[in-house]
Amino acid sequence: MTFAEYRFLLLSDLYRITGNARRGLAGACFFRGESFRYNFWLRTCAYTRSHALLRYVAYPFARFVLGRLMYRYGISIPAGTRIGSGFYIGHFGGIVVSGKATIGRNCNISQGVTIGRTNRGNHQGYPVIGDNVYIGPGAVIVGGIRVGNNVAIGANCVVTRDVPDDAVVVGVPGKVISSEGAVGYVNRTDYEGKFG
């Protein structure tokens, strides 16, 4: 990962959280906002781990801080998890994401969400979450499944099968009830080109 990519990821996360990506605002969010603080250290771990020199100097410190924040905020997202730009954590607490899951751009994750692996059955493996996805409080997404783009997953929904693009999924097990997607749930996605 280059520094420009790292900077873009941080600013896109900040823009999704606040609607602005000013440098002074980043400092304020870092000290007062749990969501951006966690994202900052998550992105910093990924950046420092990808460079030979920083891997031995800065990465251990960044990983230590991220580990402390995991316990403080109740968010367990490993540093190696592939997460696209514009990552938004709505509320902290009880969030568990497998390090081998893949999350696309502009994903909203609420409190109590689990994204993990299934060890048996037809859908063994880890989930792949598309772009512009809203995941409601308490939702569970498990197995080697694909959640399409522009999807809204309702509160306490359990998703164990593939979800098509533009779907609204609710219930246990999750069922598609609409094709209205995540419109109105995922906002501030117009950051491309704003801070190049």
Image (cartoon, rainbow, N blue to C red):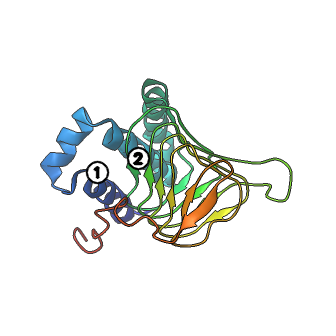
What secondary structure is found at the residue carrying circle 2? Answer: helix
Nearer to me, 178 or 13? 178
Where is residue 164 drawn, in percent x and y? 60, 71
Query: Is 27 located above or below residue 23 in the figure?
Result: above
Residue 134 image-quadrant placement: bottom left
Amino acid residing under circle 2: Thr
Q: Secondary structure at mark 1?
A: helix
Q: Evaluate if marks 1 and 2 touch, with contact meaning CB atoms under 8 Å apart.
A: no
Residue 38 as seen in the image, left or right of residue 149: left
Number of other residues with Cα within 10 Å of mark 1, as a class: few under 14, some 14 to 19, many 20 or more = many
Q: Is residue 159 left or right of residue 154?
A: right
Q: Say which quarter of the image contains residue 87.
A: bottom left
Density class for disc 2 (Cα within 10 Å; few <14, some 14-19, many ≥20) is many
Report x, y in % for residue 185: 37, 58
The residue nearer to you, when weighing 136 against 47, is 136
The residue under label 1 is which amino acid type? Ile
Residue linked to disc 2: 44
Q: Position of residue 168 (x, y in %)?
A: 52, 63
Q: CA distance from mark 1 to mark 2?
A: 17 Å
Q: Residue at x 38, y 64 (%)?
A: 5
Residue 171, disc: none
| Between 155 and 13, the one nearer to me in the picture | 155
* Labels in figure, total: 2
Quadrant containing the C terminus is bottom left
Residue 145 coordinates in the image, percent (x, y): 70, 61
Q: Nearer the viewer, mark 1 or mark 2?
A: 1
Give the residue displayed 18% in from the left and 57% down from the top.
20
Furthest residue toward front = 177
Of 50 and 167, nearer the camera is: 167
As drawn, the residue found furthest toward the right would be: 121
- For mark 1, what is the residue? 17
